């Protein structure tokens, strides 16, 4: 699926003076077309005999006509940019960068079409107790009505706190339904339409307020206000509340969800409304039950703090006292749900991410409660702070048309505007590509990484030193520039800076850079503006973005940025890497056992080795081996149960694609240096001993990387981590195979010169006996297999 909402961006006002430099070459193209048209008109009226002229005369006459009409120039016949790319720029002051003129292509000549849009969290306000004049508070639920934020302060007595996000003003709070009846504990509230619903736990009521006027107006209460009374009316400690157009739902400590019809929400039925139906809610028999409810027109979602979710069909509920069971139940889904506009449902994951789904797609998903999200909110910024923040687990949240609010674990309420960013594509002539030269970039905008002398604290800080293995050459776009990073161990050249809009498949060109040093970062002063046209990588026209001007900062995942090259073979080889692992360096030391602190020279060599390993797993040979394991290796792959039939034993056909995806999509690896006599692995840990750092170029058993990598899934008794079977053996033999064919990304020990490192900087010396090439006479089984069965 490409992107969720397809809608064209708002058109620019006529007469706007905003520069659109990305469209400059398109503008020149239009000028040329107009010049040609003028010239043809002149021909038709004054130069009827042109067809009889020679080719040279025609060219001279065309040049004369262009000059006389003032085309492609400023009236003097000069043209500083005609047909050429913008001059090379780098980290220059903005007023020194030469920007070509801009002219927008007429839509009838090169129409543009919307190709997707998404919403992002912009700069957020964070609300705390002090903002409401309180020393302390207990925010347990949040809801939105327009620009007003409603927060359930679960104190005794409780209150509904109100805040206007647009005016940034605290509004009068709601303390109860009357001067004599307040909120005795207030664990939940929700808004549906123009009504506010609150669940007052120890008051044994669900109270309903009208929000259509200038101030909230009390309508009535469900429940009797006491834990005793007629069972068809009473509520016993309501913990959660939800509503849709037909019903009101309240969960209480009697392991049930009571249901009322909306038609009974009338002032004259205050505390007297009769329940319409009941839903079963097992394992919720105390006031400490952490349940949340959310209703759509046809479904009710009951979720718990651990992510467990129950789903009920509430499209039509007959009047009954029989407990209705859920139609779906699933663990670890989401801890809170919110029904949004445009038939959407939002789910707060325990990881902190808030995902948005189309309810029609959810209803069509038979095997899981939620399908593939069409929206996702992860990052935001605090006001005045350019450091990107990540949402933590939401205790509760709310999503409005243009606003999102989330209660975080530290009792802060994050309130962030939602900004829509749109992408559109156009055909026709491609705009010029920005040119950058490393020599033109100011030295303070360049930096090195993993260099000798770099502190251990820096090396092991994931915020400073980490990368994705399939983005060894990567970038990050901000509002004022592009930051490029290279974890390549060798310099790279002739680089296209490619990007794509989040969720899109349209790669486009942000610029071209002549070269980038090994293990380095640079920053380019290059703003990305609304309406600027960027050439598509596939040559099929251009891409434009709109809505960027409303963002104070760009989130890190707005654009996926990578570097590619049409001429640099090393860059091309790096682009073949498929796994998406995040690579970082572990904070291991002797205090953790058989570990040594990683140093820059070990970190650089680790990057070389893990790059080669990832490239091997990306190769057609490994994929062929994996999916034809019996044929190639002589046996099926097997799990922790060993070489037996049954669970955990030999793989079945369906296991291979599942684990292949798991291998490629493993979350992260924390690399380190061990002194255990081989290596250590498991979880995200991956450490190997010191001699591999120089012997892997020769005949070492570098299969140890596959062995320790495999410990993530299996023990020594499995093919994941057994020296004579499976992943270790396959990695060793494929490494030797590609090494002999000279196809690995790194083959030269002089790239890092690890073997020449002074002895005092190494944990063990260099054994020259381990730096001898494999004899030509040695041919391993995989080499023989692929010689006989070439791909």
Image (cartoon, helix red, strand yellow):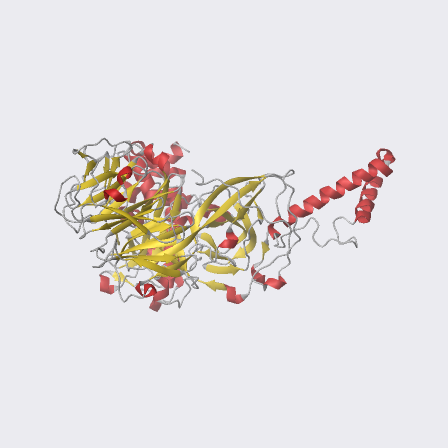
Query: Is 113 displayed left or right of 603 in the figure?
Result: right
- Is 60 located above or below residue 606 in the figure? above
Q: Quadrant of the C terminus?
A: top left
| Residue 445 seen by the camera | yes
How many discs mark residues in the rendered view? Answer: 0
Q: Position of residue 672 (x, y in %)?
A: 31, 58
Query: Looking at the picture, does residue 618 appear above or below residue 173?
Result: above
Residue 296 is left or right of residue 536, and the answer is: left
Residue 389, relative to residue 233: is it above or below?
Answer: below
Q: Quadrant of the N terminus?
A: top left
Q: Is residue 699 left or right of residue 511?
A: left
Instruction: Name the residue: 17% across, 41% down.
Output: 233
Outermost residue, left side: 228
Residue that lies at the very extreme toward the front in this rendered image = 268
Front residue of 70/597: it is 70
- Decide if residue 699 is in sight here: no
Name the foreground residue: 34 vs 437: 34
Q: Position of residue 147 (x, y in %)?
A: 40, 53
The image quadrant that residue 127 belongs to is bottom left
- The residue at the point 76 percent across, 40 percent down is 37
Quarter holding residue 461 = bottom left
Q: Nearer the viewer, residue 25 or 313?
A: 313
Q: Is residue 571 left or right of residue 698?
A: right
Q: Nearer the viewer, residue 176 or 640?
A: 176
At horizontal 44% and vertical 64% (from top left) the residue drawn is 384
Place of residue 766 in the rendered image (x, y in percent of width and height, measured from the top left): 34, 61
Can you give x and y, in whole percent of width and height, for residue 710 in the image?
27, 46
């Amino acid at each position: 699926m490409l992107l969720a909402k397809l809608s064209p961006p708002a058109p620019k006002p006529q007469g706007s003076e905003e520069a659109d430099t990305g469209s400059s070459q398109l503008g020149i193209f239009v000028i040329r077309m107009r010049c040609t048209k003028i010239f043809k008109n002149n021909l038709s009226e004054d130069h009827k005999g042109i067809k009889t002229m020679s080719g040279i005369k025609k060219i001279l006459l065309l040049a004369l006509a262009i000059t006389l009409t003032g085309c492609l120039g400023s009236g003097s016949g000069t043209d500083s940019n005609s047909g050429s790319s913008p001059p090379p720029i780098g980290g220059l002051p903005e007023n020194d960068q030469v920007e070509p003129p801009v002219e927008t292509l007429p839509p009838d000549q090169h129409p543009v079409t919307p190709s997707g849009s998404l919403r992002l969290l912009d700069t957020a306000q964070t609300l705390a107790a002090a903002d409401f004049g309180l020393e302390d508070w207990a925010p347990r639920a949040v809801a939105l009505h327009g620009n007003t934020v409603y927060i359930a302060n679960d104190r005794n007595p409780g209150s509904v706190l109100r805040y206007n996000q647009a005016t940034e003003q605290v509004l009068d709070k709601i303390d109860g339904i009357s001067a004599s009846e307040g909120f005795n504990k207030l664990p939940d509230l929700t808004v549906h339409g123009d009504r506010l619903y609150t669940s007052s736990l120890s008051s044994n009521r669900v109270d309903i307020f009208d929000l259509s006027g200038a101030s909230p107006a009390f309508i009535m209460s469900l429940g009797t206000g006491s834990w005793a009374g007629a069972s068809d009316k009473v509520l016993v400690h309501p913990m959660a509340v939800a509503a849709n157009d037909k019903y009101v739902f309240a969960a209480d400590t009697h392991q049930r969800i009571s249901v009322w019809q909306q038609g009974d929400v009338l002032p004259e039925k205050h505390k007297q409304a009769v329940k319409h139906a009941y839903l079963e809610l097992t394992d919720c028999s105390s006031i400490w039950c952490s349940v949340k409810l959310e209703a759509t027109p046809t479904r009710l979602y009951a979720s718990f703090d651990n992510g467990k979710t129950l789903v009920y069909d509430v499209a039509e509920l007959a009047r009954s006292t029989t407990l209705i069971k859920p139609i779906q139940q699933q663990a670890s889904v989401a801890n809170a749900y919110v029904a949004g506009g445009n038939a959407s449902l939002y789910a707060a994951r325990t990881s902190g991410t808030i995902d948005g789904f189309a309810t029609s797609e959810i209803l069509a998903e038979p095997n899981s409660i939620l399908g593939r999200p069409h929206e996702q909110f992860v990052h935001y910024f605090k006001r005045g702070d350019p450091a990107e923040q990540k949402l933590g687990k939401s205790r509760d949240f709310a999503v409005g048309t243009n606003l999102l609010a989330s209660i975080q674990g530290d009792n802060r309420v994050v309130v962030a505007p939602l900004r829509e960013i749109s992408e559109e594509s156009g055909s026709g002539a491609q705009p010029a590509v920005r040119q950058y030269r490393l020599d033109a970039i100011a030295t303070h905008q360049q930096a090195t990484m993993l260099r000798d002398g770099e502190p251990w604290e820096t090396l092991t800080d994931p915020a400073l030193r980490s990368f994705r293995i399939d983005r060894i050459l990567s970038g990050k776009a901000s509002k004022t520039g592009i930051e490029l990073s290279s974890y390549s161990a060798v310099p790279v050249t002739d680089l296209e800076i490619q990007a794509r809009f989040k969720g899109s498949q349209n790669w486009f060109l942000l610029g071209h850079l002549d070269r980038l040093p090994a293990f380095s970062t640079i920053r380019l002063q290059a703003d990305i503006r609304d309406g600027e046209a960027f050439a598509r990588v596939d040559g099929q026209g251009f891409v434009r973005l709109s809505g960027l001007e409303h963002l104070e900062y760009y989130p890190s995942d707005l654009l996926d940025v990578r570097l590619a090259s049409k001429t640099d073979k090393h860059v091309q080889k790096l682009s073949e890497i498929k796994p998406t692992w995040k690579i970082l360096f572990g904070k291991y030391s002797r205090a953790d056992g058989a570990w040594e602190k990683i140093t820059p020279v070990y970190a650089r060599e680790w990057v070389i080795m893990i790059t080669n390993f990832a490239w091997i797993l990306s190769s057609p040979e490994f994929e062929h081996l994996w999916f034809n394991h019996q044929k190639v290796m002589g046996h099926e792959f097997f799990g922790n149960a060993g070489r037996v039939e049954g669970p955990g034993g030999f793989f079945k056909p369906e296991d291979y694609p599942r684990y292949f995806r798991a291998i490629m999509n493993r979350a992260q690896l924390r690399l380190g240096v061990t002194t255990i006599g081989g290596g250590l692995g498991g979880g995200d840990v991956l450490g190997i001993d010191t001699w591999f750092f120089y012997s892997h170029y020769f005949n070492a058993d570098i299969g140890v990387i596959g062995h320790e990598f495999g410990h993530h899934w299996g023990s020594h008794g499995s093919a994941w981590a057994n020296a004579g079977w499976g992943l270790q053996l396959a990695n060793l033999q494929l490494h030797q195979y590609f090494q002999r064919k000279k196809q690995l990304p790194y083959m030269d020990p002089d790239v890092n010169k690890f073997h020449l490192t002074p002895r005092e900087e190494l944990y063990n010396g260099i054994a020259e006996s381990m730096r001898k090439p494999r004899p030509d006479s040695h041919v391993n089984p995989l080499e023989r297999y692929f010689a006989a069965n070439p791909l």
